[in-house]
Image: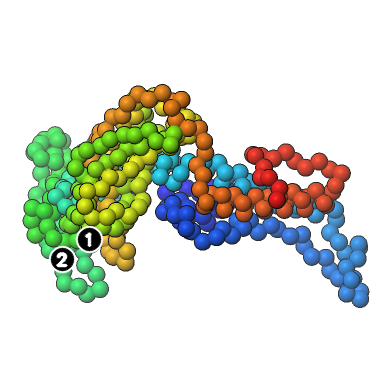
Amino acid sequence: MRADKALLAALAIAALAAVGWLAAGDDRAAPAQPAVALAAAPSPAPAPGGRIGPANAPPAPMRRQQLAQNLQLAERTYCSYLASSRYPHGSRPIAEQPDQVYPNAPVTASNPLRLDGGGSDPKVRIQTSQSRVYLAAGEAVAFSLRAVDPDGQVLPLVIARALAQGMTFNGARAGAQAQLAFADDGRLADPVAGDGAFAAVLAPAQGALASFNGTIRTDVRFSVAGRAGVVTFDVVHTPELPATWTGKVREALEDGSLHFYLAADVRQAGRYIVSGRVDDANGRPFALATFNDLLRAGPQEVRLTTFGKLLRDQQPALPLTLRDVDGYLLKENSDPDRALMPRLEGRAFVGKPHPLTAFSGAEWQSEERSRYLAEFGKDLRQARRALAAADPAAPLPPGACTEPAAN
């Protein structure tokens, strides 16, 4: 499940995302529409009698400039899509989504003291941290906060109350509540005693929030420098387990790509979104592998792919390591819109040291990609013909990438 579009060419790609190119990877998307509306030269005013005469036509240099801009835009669109679709949706360079590199890293923030009752005090900053945002059944989250002055010196802080409550909407009955005990004693979620950072653990399964499905908000009220403040932490909890991992993982070199197969016990059939991070032998993150497909109930295997051309292009040191795998059952017309699987934190599998020559250098091909390249190529050929016709004696500019064959 589970970010970044720039330049005019990226606008075309953003349009593709709307029909499912970047998100779902579904080749059944609606037929592609031309991505570029070529800018026409201003229509000349009609001469007396309704005819358009040479005196009313735009100057030749202006028209050629407009046609050259049309060609530049059409070429940029075609070349951008050609380059960005070299790899399949489910196997991409992880640099494209930097927020996905370390999904289990704590979420940290530093903000001016928010006063209980409204307003803020910029002379006091509250540093907060939470270990995760999404909680599957049985998982817990650690919160921490501390106060510092503008020079970074820790200020004494006293916790008055910490209350976790399930959020409800549209007049629904208030959700269950649970008290949290924040402490600076070096135990549980607090790594260092007496450093001014107070921490607590929220484990919904161990209390009244065990069956709550949705957003749990923890309000922490405290005092610092003689002023009362408040901070909130939000997590999304899904108590149902739609599927679990068995712990068995295998790899296979098939069709020129490397596949990781993860065994799962699927309790609820449906569409599952699973993501895994792939590091090289030096620990360098280089690929994000994603599964987005239907799974039947019962024993199943989820395939995460590292595409052959991606391996050949980036040349990672082998063997590869699959780590930090998370997944969920996608639920339509529901809030929350997912039921989480327990995550696989850290290393899930280390593969074999295959030679890079074992992988294919061929680009990804699909009906979807061919369809879009055909449409963008048609726009490009049209723009080149129009520019050539406007000034047959002038040479056309060289193409920025491989030009499509003429129809």
Q: Secondary structure at mark 1?
A: strand
Residue nearest the observer in this picture, 100 or 298: 298
Q: Amino acid at mark 1?
A: Gly
Residue 378 at x, y percent in the picture: 67, 53
Q: Which residue is mark 1?
A: 214
What residue would you read off at disc 2? 175
Image spot of residue 337 (x, y percent): 29, 60
Q: Residue at x 24, y 43 (%)?
A: 263
Residue 222 visible in the displayed image: no
Q: Amino acid at mark 2?
A: Gly
Taking the spot 26% from the left edge, 33% from the top edge, the residue there is 349
Image position of 14 (left or right of 388) = left
Dot 2, how many residues are within 10 Å of its Cα: few (below 14), some (14-19), or many (20+)? some
Q: Position of residue 362 (x, y in %)?
A: 52, 36
Looking at the image, which residue is at 75% across and 41% down? Answer: 397
Are circles 2 and 1 on residues that touch, CB within 8 Å? Answer: yes
Look at the image and name its color scheme. Answer: rainbow
Local crowd at mark 1 within 10 Å, few (<14), some, or many (≥20)?
many
Examine the image and state in which quarter residue 399 appears.
top right
Residue drawn 84% across and 68% down?
45
Residue 372 to residue 189: above or below: below
Q: Nearer the viewer, residue 11 or 341?
A: 341
Total residue callouts: 2
SS label for mark 2 = loop
Earlier in the chain: of badge 2 and badge 1, it is 2
Residue 193 falls left or right of residue 216: left
- How far is the residue under mark 2 from the one under mark 1? 10 Å
Is residue 240 among the parts visible in the rendering?
A: yes
Residue 144 got which mark?
none
| Quarter occupied by residue 199 | top left
